[in-house]
Image: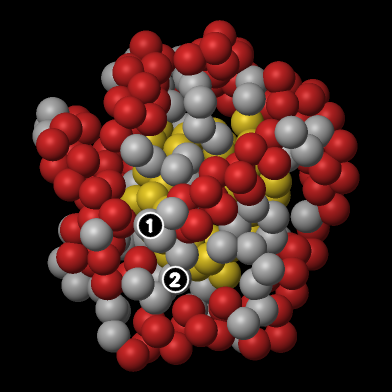
Amino acid sequence: MSKEKLDKALNRTLESGQKVFIPYIMAGDGGLDSLKEQILFLQEAGVTAIEIGVPFSDPVADGPTIQEAGKRSLQHGTSLRIVLDYLKDLKPVVRIPLIVMTYLNPVFKYGIENFCTNALQSGISGVIIPDLPLEQSELIRDHLQENEIALIQLATLTSSEERMKKIAKASEGFLYAVTVNGITGERSTVDTGEGLEHYMKRIKKHSNTPVLAGFGISTPEQVRKIGAACDGVIIGSKIISLWKEGKRNEIKELIQATQQ
């Protein structure tokens, strides 16, 4: 049911003529109580789903902004188990799909079967594990499928045609198209021209799920231009920075850019 909730939310947004907007937030940055505040704010602002990051000591895919948010969260004692337990209590007030972004080590420490079972009980619709190679995804895929949770894959600019085809075929919920070479983080310039369009066309021809672009997107203009080449966007570092600065209206402007 959880994966179905994500599929329906994505389709509902796209069928309405809008682009998907998924913000990334770091669980426990500012304490766990701030997580409830963020989720409810973003839900009311009209996002399609929310990606919730879990802090990890060696976040290989994360840029400085998310790394610092992770450090602040770890200082509050945040862990994968604590986050799932907290989200379980929020189920009555959360209407939109939630996606957990974590690394493989915390999942192993939790216990793969227990993690998948508890993720379902916490209302999780999808999981992103950036350091889990496609070839090793069977470690967790069957357990996630038993609990009807999507395993979302990432495609990169350097992926070969054959590998991109395999990644697209394996991805559930949506395909996460990384738009830069490198780690996450705000960038003043992101390719929004022919190179981006070509990359998205390559991915979309192989994908049976919506294709969402992420990494480096930080302005309403980038949201509109990149969103026009795919099915929507994922924004993390900019959301974290704006929330920390108390700039709620600027977060709404980013979200509204997918509706124009």
Q: Toward which corner of the image does residue 130 lie, by quadrant?
A: bottom right
Q: Nearer the viewer, residue 9 or 175?
A: 9
User: Dot 1, crowdedness within 10 Å: few (<14), some or many (≥20)?
Assistant: some
Q: CA distance from mark 2 to mark 1?
A: 11 Å
Q: Amino acid at mark 2?
A: Cys
Quadrant location of the C terminus in the rendered image? bottom left
The x and y percentages for residue 253 are 17, 47
Compared to residue 143, the image places residue 120 above or below, namely above
Q: Which residue is mark 2?
A: 230
| One can see residue 180 in this view | no
The structure residue drawn at horizontal position 32% and vertical position 18%, both measured from the top left corner, is 37
So how many labels did they put on this image?
A: 2
Q: Which residue is mark 1?
A: 18
Number of residues whose C-alpha sits closer than 10 Å to that of mark 2, classed few (under 14), some (14–19) or many (20 or more): many
Specify the amino acid type for callout 1: Gln
Which badge, 2 or 1, comes first in the chain's sequence?
1
